[in-house]
Amino acid sequence: MRIELRDQPFSPLAELAEYQAELEQRLSGQYGATAIFIGTMRDINEGAAVRGMTLEHYPGMTERQLQRMVEAAFQEWPLLDALVLHRVGALQPNDPIVLIAVWSAHRAEAFAACRFLIEELKSKAPLWKRETLTSGSRWVEHNTAAPD
Amino acid sequence: MAIHVKYFASLRDRLGRAGDELEASAGLTVAGVWAALHPDAPLPPNTLTAVNLDYAELTQAVREGDEVAFFPPVTGG
């Protein structure tokens, strides 16, 4: 299991490949399903062009809440491993914001746990986006509700 | 007792500071911490609260040395 906040841009697919190489040694032959979610910064939000973004966090609490979410997912489903990376600091459009990957024997629990983790993260992890617009900046006031 | 208070994101900007140090008598709740520091300003709707890095209800009692945080809805991911 790996849960990290990153203050520099990262490549989700490169991170995934590196983590999975290590996992192939440790869990050889055990996992049949890997579910992945990657969140990326868009250049438009609520009708306004967004030039950049700053992600603020609550050092200590953010890491602890992410840890609790992953532990809850392991309680709920028979998972083999999980990887959660989230950016903080200054971002530009197209920068990856979050990577969530979940490994399990079968697809149902991998999909369910991955979905659970991103929805929990979006509603409970202490992280706040401030968008830089063409003129001025604004705090994002709330996340969109989880779709059905 | 000494309580360490933190504010984040838009709430910090609105208050103009990242935190407060409160010297209070025993028996205070999270809601009481806010009221003691901001007697003229009710807690903004939807504000989230935490004690010692975990979410806490407004009715939770605080203790000597606790870190109490107030912040707006989270927008990560």
Image (cartoon, coloured by chain):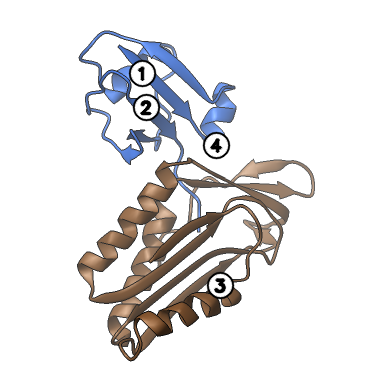
Question: How busy is the neighbourhood of tag 1: few (under 14 within 10 Å), some, or many (20 plus)?
Answer: some
Secondary structure, mark 2, is strand
Question: How busy is the neighbourhood of tag 2: few (under 14 within 10 Å), some, or many (20 plus)?
Answer: some
Judge by depth and name the residue closer to the eye, B77 or A1: A1
The answer to whether tags 2 and 3 share a subunit is no
Mark identifier at residue A15:
3
Chain letter of the residue beneath label 2 in the structure image: B
Residue A142 in view in this figure: yes
The answer to whether tags 2 and 4 share a subunit is yes
Q: Which residue is drawn at 51% across and 34% down?
A: B8
How far apart, in angstroms, are the residues tagged by discs 2 and 4?
Answer: 17 Å
User: Could you tell me if the residues under marks 1 and 2 are in contact, i.e. CB atoms within 8 Å?
Assistant: yes
How far apart, in angstroms, are the residues tagged by discs 3 and 1?
Answer: 40 Å
Q: Give the residue at the far right of this rendering.
A: A134
Residue A75: quarter of image = bottom left
Chain letter of the residue beneath label 3 in the structure image: A
User: Could you tell me if the residues under marks 2 and 3 are in contact, i.e. CB atoms within 8 Å?
Assistant: no
Q: Which residue is drawn at 79% across and 44% down?
A: A135
Q: In this view, does A12 lie to the left or right of A74?
A: right
Determine the colour of chain A.
Answer: brown
Q: Position of residue A54 (x, y in %)?
A: 64, 47
Q: Residue at x 66, y 61 (%)?
A: A9
Q: What residue type is labelled 3?
A: Glu
Q: Earlier in the sequence, mark 2 or mark 4?
A: 4
The residue singled out by tag 2 in the image is: B67
Q: Where is residue A138 in the image (x, y as percent from the top left)?
A: 65, 42
Mark 3 or 1, closer to the camera: 3
Question: How busy is the neighbourhood of tag 3: few (under 14 within 10 Å), some, or many (20 plus)?
Answer: some
Task: Indicate whether B46 appears above or below A96.
Answer: above
Determine the colour of chain B.
Answer: blue
Q: Earlier in the sequence, mark 1 or mark 4?
A: 1
